[in-house]
Structure formats: C-alpha cells, structure tokens
Amino acid sequence: MQSMMIPKKTCDKIESLVKQFIWGASERRRKMPLVNWDAICQPKMSGGLGLMKLKDQNISFLMKLGFKLVSDKEAFWVRVVRSKYQMNDELPNCIDRNRCSFLWKSLSKIWTLFRDSIHWSIGDGRTIRCWKDNWIPHIGPLLRYTPSNFSLNTDYTLYEMTSEDGSEGFLVMLKELGGLSEDPSCPICGYFLEDSLHILRDCPAAKDVWVQVNLVFDAELWGILDGLKLVQRRGFNQVVILSDCLEVVKAILGSSSANSNSALIRRIHNILSQQNQWILRYIPREQNQIANWLAKHALIGKATMQVFDVPPEGSSSIIESDKFMSDTFTCA
C-alpha cells in the first residue's frame, strides 16, 4: 500500500468488506447501505466517518514517496534510488518503467500527477536559479521566453535578483533583460505608470498569466475554506463571509456540491449546507481594504495562521475607512 500501486480490483474488494462491516452485513446476509460511500468518506466535521478511499490513500502514499525522492536527497534510500535510476538534480517529465523495481514502476504511474501537484517553495530564493529553474507553475523556465540575443547571467538566483526588501525584485529582473526605459508608461497596455503592482497584477498581459496559472483563484478558495473550518470549530451560529473576489463568489454560489469539478468548492458547500445562518457575499475591493492590510501584516509574523479576537493595532483606521466606503456605495 505504501510503496507499490495496488490494483483497483483489490482496492474495490477490500472496500466491499469494509462496507459489509459498517452495515453489519456478510456474504450470506446482504444489507442495503443507507448512506453512499462518498458521504461516508467525508471528514467527520462534514458529516462523514473520516474514512479514506483506498485508491486515494494508495496514491497519497506514493506521492509522499515521490516528494521525499525530490526533496530529501540526503536520505540513504533516496541516494540509492536516484543513483540506480540516474536521476539528476532536474525534475524529469517522466520516468522509465522498463526493467525496474515495483517501487519505481509504481512511482512512474503517478509521476505526471505528482509533477502537476508540486510547487516551488521560494523562501529567500538563494537556491533557485531565476532563469533556469522551473519555479513558476505551468510557465516553465523563464529562459525559454527570452530572445537568444539577450546577454544574461543565467546562474543568478532569485535572491540576487531582488533588492534587500524585495520590493524591486521584478524591476531588477527587467533591468537584467534591458526592458526598462525612461518612459514610465506600460508599453503593452499604455497605462501611465508601470510600477511593480501593474507589472505583476493589473496589466492585461499579467492577468492572462494569472488566469493560466490559476493560483489566485485557488488561494481565495483555500482562504474561505480555512475560515469556515475555523468559525465552525468555534461554534458560531450567525456568520457572514465577505470576499472581494467576484469570480470565486460566483463559482461557489452558482454551483452545487454535486456538479462542481472543484474539490475545494465541494468542501465549502458541505460546510455551508450544515449551517442555515451562514452567508457568503461579494464585497468590492474598495470596501475591503482591511483584508489587504491583514495580508501584508501576516507577512511580518512567522505564524502560518493568526487569529485576532480584537482588531490588531493600527487596523482601526482601515476598518473605519471600509465602513465609510460601504456607506458611500450604499447611498449611491
């Protein structure tokens, strides 16, 4: 189960025995299940029993081994496997399954899924080569997008491409490309000021990239899901969830857990369906500046999640400004 791919028929047979045990059935005495298997496999907080489908669990174990294989290079077994199958520092697109062990053959079956599921952890950028490494999901190495006549130091790390506070990182990158001029306007869309925020977010060309990568959408969904689980654990009865991402709100409210292709949206629906007085609403970004302030404030701390029972110091003026904007929009 943990080191080789289990055949689907074997998983189905084991799950059949588990189902018989749950409903008190046997091979001689059949019983009709009162709840479908998908519902039973939901987390306990979502009304299920917390069981995992064996096929999913088997794939999860192999994905964990794959992650160890690419991240824990000092482990003895990893050094043996990488040496035996001549796996260099670069992450291969696929792995050969000819004349290999059961472990390697099993990893080859989930390798495509594994590659699509991992992302670089940037950190301080000291170990990531800006131009050569595949550190932007679904984009690939930046070197392939640069003209061949450009003179670049392709061994620059991300750390070396940024200033001390990180604020001018992509401007330094553009200088390396020779793409900055005295004209402050954007050469692509004509916007009067091409600052860092415009380059990374507001320019139509940048928006096209983010749509392809789809990270912002998933990040918003994860934020809503984590918030829902937090308030659920605290036992609140009346909750209003506000999001300034209209696409996410439409995706959640415009679908159901049955027809959505997103596992995150289905999990959000499962929680909302259990709470009669929980409401999800869209709020314009102009009325939700506190969310942007808290996101920047969180970068200063080291905790992965911060929960405030009272507004943090310095946020009161932002909250009052949001209230004023909300009243202004309402009156208009």
Image: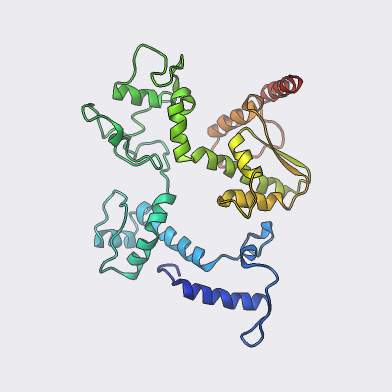
Does residue 309 appear to the left or right of 306 in the view shown? right
Does residue 189 appear to the left or right of 93 in the view shown? right
Which quadrant is the N terminus positioned in?
Answer: bottom left
Q: Residue at x 47, y 66 (%)?
A: 58
Residue at the farthest top position = 182
Percent coordinates x, y for residue 7 in the rendering: 44, 72
Does residue 10 appear to the left or right of 224 in the view shown? left
The quadrant in which residue 130 appears is top left
Q: Residue at x 39, y 51 (%)?
A: 115
Which quadrant is the C terminus positioned in?
Answer: top right
Q: Residue at x 60, y 75 (%)?
A: 18
Way the structure is coloured: rainbow
Residue 264 in view in this figure? yes
- Pick the residue in front: 214 or 317: 214
- In this rendering, is residue 287 above or below 27? above
Residue 67 in view in this figure? no
Percent coordinates x, y for residue 157 in the rendering: 32, 34
Percent coordinates x, y for residue 131 in the rendering: 30, 35
Give the total of numbered labels: 0
- Pick the residue in front: 1 or 178: 178
Does residue 299 appear to the left or right of 93 in the view shown? right
The quadrant in which residue 21 appears is bottom right
Percent coordinates x, y for residue 97 in the rendering: 29, 65
Q: Residue at x 33, y 54 (%)?
A: 73
